[in-house]
Image (cartoon, rainbow, N blue to C red):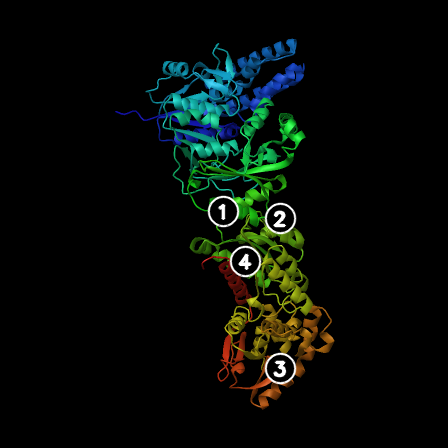
Amino acid sequence: MRVPPWSVHKFGGSSLADADCFRRVASIIEALLQTRVAVVLSACRGVTDELIGIVGAAEKLDEQGYRATLERLRARHTGIAQELLPEPARGHYLERLNADLSDLERIMHAVTLVRSAGADVRDVAAGYGELWSSRLFAAWLAARGQRAPVVWVDARDIVVVEWGPLGPRVQWQRSAALARERIAVEAEATLVIPGFVATGPRGVQTTLGRNGSDFSASIFGALLEAGEIVIWTDVDGVLSADPRRVPDAKVIDSMSYNEAMELAYFGAKVIHPQTMAPAVAGSIPIRIRNTFAPELPGTLIQQKSDSALVVKGITSIEDTALINVEGAGMIGVPGTAHRLFGALREAEISVVLISQGSSEHSICFAIPAAQAVAAERAVRAAFATELREGQIQSVEVSDDCSIVAIVGDGMAGSHGIAGKLFGALGSAGVNVRAIAQGASERNISVVVDRRDAAKALRAVHSGFYLSPHTLSIGLVGPGTVGSVLLAQLASQAERLRHDCNLDLRVRGIATSKRMLLAERAIDLASWREQLAARGEPVDLRRFAQHVAADHLPHRVMIDCTADAGVAARYAEWFRAGLHVVTPNKKAHSAGLEQFRAMQEARRAAGTHYLYEATVGAGLPIMLTVRDLRETGDEIRAIDGIFSGTLAYLFNVFDGSTPFSRIVADARARGFTEPDPRDDLSGTDVARKLVILGREMGLALGLEDVAVESLVPEPLRECSVAEFLERLPAHDEPMRALVEGARREGRLLRYVGRLTADGRATVGVERLEARHAFANISLTDNIVRFSTARYCDNPLIVQGPGAGPAVTAGGVFGDLLRLASYLGARI
């Protein structure tokens, strides 16, 4: 019968912080289907640092300090043992713990006598944490009862290493022989092994250095010829970027050993290349998983990735200096690069990146910024003669740089990768200082100014990982219309993401007093509660800056207010690269100078301005005007009922119910503006005529529209509350007006008329009952277009023109239209 392979599981310090963490780890191990499991453990979180600290305290003769730390460590491990272990296992564990602490105290006392600690002493002290955590866990696991026996294995009895310039080097033959001697490799068992610790060639305890426990897992994976190595940590896997700098960072499902090593070199939170070496040599898959979310699959690192992702990660190296050596005397001269990098080698300077043009006129290279002064000195010394004689013109140092790199095996032979990289950087306004790519095409690195590093990371990550149809959305005015729009967005967002690859992210919501900002997206199911809990004083300039995130492909402001001050900001928003979608009529009907400046800003920025809902709510009024003009038709006149509010009022008002009561009811239903006088004054209809006139190409202003107001003169300047309170006193003139029309067999309608020569009027008209404008439903708008094509039988658009749902629907339609302009297929 074939024996199943060993499965090695390593748990880091964050996974072993307290008793609950030990329970969690035990549950993970017990849930495994394998019967041959090796568990490699780090010290409990923070313990190694404390153990290293006591050596420093002893060297400084701080006896009180190191004794206090030892007591703290005793109390912490004793507390976990008392919570987890039954007797007699608890007594045995505590006896050994106290013996170790006594040994440590004697060692520290010896250090105080000589006031110095050698590397051996530091290694012995630093390694106790893993011994304590692994012994405790082995006793705890055994006490719970397992399918297979639990065996504590002392890594110091098996792993033999010798330290050299490149770190610890495993003596594989000797270690393998010890493993066969100490471990029943063919048996079923759960081995619990302290990570980090090993033995030197002379039998003295040592450690495996940085990432030592990961290295231990890889070593034991190789020694046991394991089928897999699982590194349990506090993240969901290897991320495509640092989530602290790139909020949209994603877990990579699979990557190759080479990809993982490239990313690790650039500082990504991946298993260290050196620690992977034993697994790579044995072709053992490594999986990174989250102890606190064991249901997630994590990231699989293996010989060849089976992920569909072309780019596996975007990462950076900070605090980099770029040195450029330039001169005509370098062209065609053999050995120049040899002299340059030989000088840097002699100065012990690490070169991170090299870039040279085919002309050989210059060579630039990146190094750690801390070595910039030494590097410049070394280069100038090596080429002193050439600099003096002018063969090399300059040695320039830029010490405020960062390197941004994209990594992926799938980049090799894939067209457009570099184009997408540089396109994303260009769109974000990031200047590239130097470029490097190896022949393997696994890595493209660019040097950028350090101040642009985060922006570059976000922009590049967006280019490769986000839908190209991702919109950063800021909504101003979540009132009657705005709140309904947010509900509509919430109901359709998932469908649009799934069916159209359209990612609509509402990242900001602003009222007149407070605003809510989110780095990724606001949960629209609870935006009101979030605004109340986390909202901050509104600052529309900062709000716009937040929405205009340069790492997202497209940015749009939705203005659902009726505020002229907000509308006055459109030009500023356009210049910032923001598109604007709005039902707010104030911008498009503002003074001609402001209107033209806004349009010029939009054209200069190449942004879009959509305002279908400014006239007719969700009806295609503006779209019809544009289509008629752009297809060459001549619009001779536009007339109609443009106010859903006034349509409702005159449909309902027959004299039997006071006009003031109908107005109050319409306001309560959301059919009027918050201040009904905005509708009753006729100004709202006048603004719509101005918007239509300008769409026809007319230089029309509000002052050019003759308006009949329905607001009584005494009520035009008072508050809204006072207006509503005093309006009943003015019901009689309106009753007389409707009675007069009834005697003539006519109906009252509030009509707007606009002709091609710029004549515009707004007012109450008495229409025959068979007139098209007389036969409309409640809040209908009806707009009639008389054109060269539609002259005998005018084109009519009719439908609901008021109410939060239809207006919000019109705005939503504009948002989707914008997305289609930007390339989405809807």
- Provide the residue designation for mark 4: 486
Element under disc 4: helix
Question: Label 4 amino acid?
Answer: Leu
Question: Label 3 amino acid?
Answer: Val
Measured Cα–Cα span from mark 2 to mark 1: 40 Å
Find residue 776 and report its horizontal and vertical position in percent: 52, 79
Of callouts 1 and 3, the N-terminal one:
1
- Above or below residue 818? Residue 163 is above
Work out whether residue 280 or residue 727 is closer to the camera in this orientation and state it. Answer: 280
Measured Cα–Cα span from mark 1 to mark 3: 61 Å
Measured Cα–Cα span from mark 2 to mark 3: 48 Å
Of circles 2 and 4, the one toward us is 4
Of callouts 2 and 3, the N-terminal one:
2
- Circle number at residue 196: none
- Provide the residue designation for mark 2: 534
Measured Cα–Cα span from mark 1 to mark 4: 36 Å
- Seen at 57% across and 47% down, the residue is 519
Find residue 424 and report its horizontal and vertical position in percent: 53, 47
- Circle number at residue 419: 1
Find residue 801 and report its horizontal and vertical position in percent: 54, 72
- Within-10-Å neighbours for mark 2: few <14, some 14–19, many 20+: few
- Within-10-Å neighbours for mark 1: few <14, some 14–19, many 20+: few
Question: Label 1 amino acid?
Answer: Gly
Measured Cα–Cα span from mark 2 to mark 4: 18 Å
Of callouts 4 and 3, the N-terminal one:
4
Of callouts 2 and 1, the N-terminal one:
1
Of circles 1 and 3, the one toward us is 1
Of callouts 2 and 4, the N-terminal one:
4
- Provide the residue designation for mark 3: 764
- Seen at 61% across and 61% down, the residue is 602
Mark 2 and 3 residues: CB-CB less than 8 Å, in contact?
no
